[in-house]
Amino acid sequence: MTNTHAKFLKLITDVPDFPKPGIIFKDISPLLASEWFPELIQELAELVRESVNENNITRIAGIESRGFILGAALAHEMNIGFIPVRKEGKLPPPTVRHSYALEYGTDTIEVKAGTGSVIIIDDVLATGGTLTAAATALTAAGYTVTDIAVLMDLKFLNRFEWQGRAAKSLFAFS
Ligand code: AMP
């Protein structure tokens, strides 16, 4: 791990039993609030730059809500557009909806229809359910999901792949 990455990691706090007992929540708020936020975005840009250039990716899709913070800043840094992947009922119609199973019950996300090659961004990849749902919704909405990148991949919880591609990450926890 580089010194840059180590200093980011020091500003990510493990919060036990939030939002439910047994979950160790990775709180990125101290990192977002720090002077290192611009450098974090530059590091994420380095992570995806080759893929964005090679695959002619024209938009970043960010997942509500921490994916909005990282994704919008990254889209600005990469000089490309941003698409919000939102929770149900937040976007005005028409939207493309996708429901997916949770441990208990279901959840629904919505996106606006569009075209072109996109990369999805989120803060944490845990089971992979959210990213799979976002990729499925964006595909149904007309986009080509070419790549996926996260700040942290909790690899011990998932074997995530989208169409044979693993997610890119700044930090992987095995
Ligand atoms: P999953 O669908 O299980 O991969 O969960 C990913 C989504 O839930 C992401 O949008 C994360 O922001 C959030 N999430 C899941 N686990 C954590 C965690 N341990 N710490 C912070 N956020 C998490």
Image (spheres, helix red, strand yellow):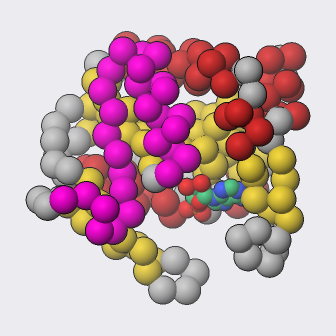
Query: Up-down: is 26 above or below 88?
Result: above
Closer to the camera in the image, 10 or 145 = 10
Q: Residue 75, located in which quarter of the rendered image?
A: top left
Image check: 53 left or right of 97? right
Closer to the camera in the image, 144 or 159 = 144
Quick check: is 170 in the magenta stretch?
A: no
Count of residue discs: 0
- What's the magenta region? 65-92
Image check: 70 left or right of 157? left
Q: Position of residue 121 (x, y in %)?
A: 49, 39
Q: Residue at x 80, y 17 (%)?
A: 4
Whether residue 32 is visible here, answered yes or no, is yes
Whether residue 43 is visible here, answered yes or no, is no
Image check: 5 left or right of 160? right
Q: Residue at x 73, y 76 (%)?
A: 20
Image check: 55 left or right of 51? left
Query: Up-down: is 11 above or below 27?
Result: above
Q: Position of residue 153 (x, y in %)?
A: 67, 45
Quick check: is 76 in the magenta stretch?
A: yes
Q: Residue 29, located in which quarter of the rendered image?
A: top right
Q: Position of residue 171 (x, y in %)?
A: 73, 35
Q: Position of residue 83 (x, y in %)?
A: 31, 40
Q: Report ligand 1 position as a quadrant.
A: bottom right
The residue positioned farthest toward the left in the image shown: 94
Q: Residue 34, located in which quarter of the rendered image?
A: top right
Q: Residue at x 25, y 65 (%)?
A: 97
Q: Quadrant of the N terminus?
A: top right
Query: Up-down: is 39 above or below 86?
Result: above
Q: Residue at x 40, y 46 (%)?
A: 163
